[in-house]
Image (cartoon, grey):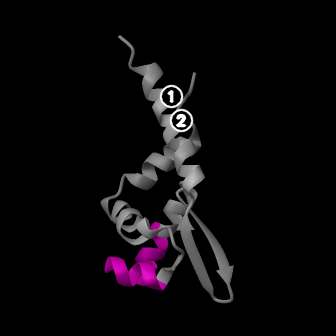
Amino acid sequence: MSTLTPELQAFLYGLASETRQHILFEVFIDGQEHTVGQVAERSGLGQSTASEHLAVLKRAGILISRREGKEVYYRPQREGVLARLAQLTDLLTHCCQE
């Protein structure tokens, strides 16, 4: 039986913000890499605010990053998202039985 793990809690927290949902589903929907500056521009946020949201999404296992020189590139972590969704499905299936 599944339990609410710290990883699953971080995943749910990462998706709890409308701003982070917007970043994920509007900016990263293409599955491509984007820099903090690109995310800020496309989401209408300041760079520091975008960076904070990207850090939460990364801790949540929703995004991964790589550094190239001074730039950090973020992209969706599809396998991590699917794994957390499977965990959540299992947890909800077992916790809400009649």
Q: Quadrant of the N terminus?
A: top right
Q: Main secondary structure of the magenta part?
A: helix
The spot of residue 60 in percent (x, y) is 53, 54
Identify whether 72 is placed above or below 54: below
Q: Is residue 63 left or right of residue 41?
A: right
In the rendered image, residue 44 lying in the magenta stretch gets the answer: yes
Badge 2: few (under 14), some or many (20 or more) residues near its Cα, within 10 Å? some
Q: Nearer the viewer, residue 51 or 38?
A: 38
Question: Farthest residue toward the top?
Answer: 98
The spot of residue 45 in percent (x, y) is 35, 79
> According to the image, label 1 marks what residue?
90
Say which mark, if any, is on residue 69. none
Badge 1: few (under 14), some or many (20 or more) residues near its Cα, within 10 Å? some
Say which mark, if any, is on residue 87. 2
Residue found at x 49% / y 41%: 85
Give the magenta range: 37-53
